[in-house]
Image: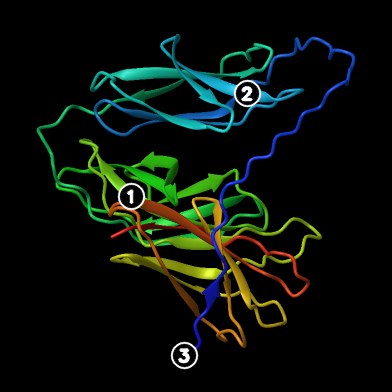
Amino acid sequence: MQRPFATGLLAPLALALTLAGCSAAPEPKDTRAPTTPTGVTATAGSASTVHVMWSAATDDRAVTGYTVFSEGRRIKDLPATTLMTDVVGLTPATPHRFTVRARDAAGNVSPPSATVTATTLRAAAEDRTSPTTPAALRATPDGSRAATLRWTPARDDTRVTAYDVYQADTRIHTVPGTATSTRVTGLRPGTAYAFTLRARDAAENSSPDSAPAELTTAPSPGAPPNTAPTRLTATSTKGEITVTWTPPVTGAPVTHHELHLDGRFATTIIWGTTPPPDRATYTFPVQDPPGTRYTVTLRAQLPDGTWGDFSAPRTVVVR
C-alpha cells in the first residue's frame, strides 16, 4: 500500500516593514456614527444566562466594536468581529432588556438598537444530567450566504432549554430549546462549512456534539466551482492523529494536499506516484498532552499549481 509523505513543518514567520521619509496630508476628522445594529435577539439559556445576537452595523470607514447594554447599563464591550455574546449572572425568573450600539475608531457611537427582552428561567434543583445528543442534523444551503439547519430534538430529565450551533469549537448561534430548525447567516459564497449541534438545559449541562452536517454555499455569479476536499474526518489514537478525506475532482490526479492545524500551515502531504482514486488517509505523530484540541483543515493543489479551497474544519482531541 502506497503511503503519502510530508514536507517539514514551517515555523511561524514575522515580517517587519518600516517606511520612512513619507508624509501625507492628515485625513479629515471622522464625525459620522455607524448605523444602528439590527436583528437583535435575546434568548434565555438558563436561570442566569441570556444569549444576545445581532446583525452587523456599517460605517463610512469601519465599525470597530459593539457595546451591549442591559436596562440601559453598559455590560459588555466586544470587537467588530463578534456578533453574539452570553450575558451571565442574571436574576432567575426575571425579564431582562437589552440593546446594542456600534462604535468606530473615532469614538462615534450609533443610536441604540431596538430593545429586546428575555425572561430567565426559574432556578431548579441541582441538576447534573446532560441532555441527549441531538440527532439527524441536516444542513442545506440557502443561497450563497446562509444555511438552514434541521434536527431531531434531544431529551433531558428536566427539559432542553437551548440548542447551540458550533463551527469546529466556536459557538456561532443559539436558539430556544423548542426549536428543531434555524437559519445561519453571514456565510461566505462558495465555501465549505461543517456544523455541529449541542443541546443545553437550565443548569447549563450540555450534550455531546451531534454528528457534523457539511455543506458548500452557492458560489458568487461567475465564480469557479468550489475545490475543497470533502467528507473530512479526524481521529486520534495514542501519539498520533489520522485524517481521512475525499479529494476534489479537478480533472487530474491530486498529488499534493496542505494540512493546516488551528488555521496555521503544518505540512504538505504528497503522493509520490498515483494517489488513491477515492478516499485518502494520512497519519501523523503528535507530542501534545492528552486533551489538546486541534482544528484540522485541508486544501488540494490544483492542476495549474495553485491551491484550492479549504475543507470544512474538523475538531480532534489528542488522546
Amino acid type, mark 1: Arg
Describe residue 275's horizontal placement relative to residue 196 as left or right: right
- Is residue 114 among the parts visible in the rendering? no
Of 252 and 163, nearer the camera is 252
Of 278 and 179, nearer the camera is 278
From the image, state whether disc 3 or disc 1 is nearer to you. Answer: 3
**Furthest residue to the bottom?**
1
Amino acid type, mark 3: Met
- Give the residue displayed 70% in from the left and 25% down from the top: 62
Which residue position is annotated with label 3? 1
Describe residue 108's horizontal placement relative to residue 205 as left or right: right
* Label number found at residue 198: 1
Describe residue 12's horizontal placement relative to residue 240 as left or right: right
Question: Dot 3, how many residues are within 10 Å of its Cα: few (below 14), some (14-19), or many (20+)?
Answer: few
Q: Is residue 286 above or below residue 37?
A: below
Q: Are marks 2 and 1 in contact (CB under 8 Å)?
A: no
From the image, state whether disc 2 or disc 1 is nearer to you. Answer: 2
Name the spot of residue 252 as percent of width and height, x first.
Answer: 71, 82
What is the count of numbered marks?
A: 3
* Label number found at residue 270: none
Which residue position is annotated with label 2? 64
- Is residue 158 among the parts visible in the rendering? yes
Amino acid type, mark 2: Thr
Q: Is residue 128 above or below residue 317?
A: above
Question: Dot 1, how many residues are within 10 Å of its Cα: few (below 14), some (14-19), or many (20+)?
Answer: many
Q: In 3D space, how far apart are the residues under numbered discs 2 and 1 (Cα atoms)?
A: 31 Å
- Label 2 sits on a secondary structure element that is strand
- Give the residue displayed 70% in from the left and 14% down from the top: 33
**Which numbered disc flags the more N-terminal residue, 3 or 1?**
3
Residue 10 lies in quadrant? bottom right
**Which numbered disc flags the more N-terminal residue, 3 or 2?**
3
The color scheme shown is rainbow
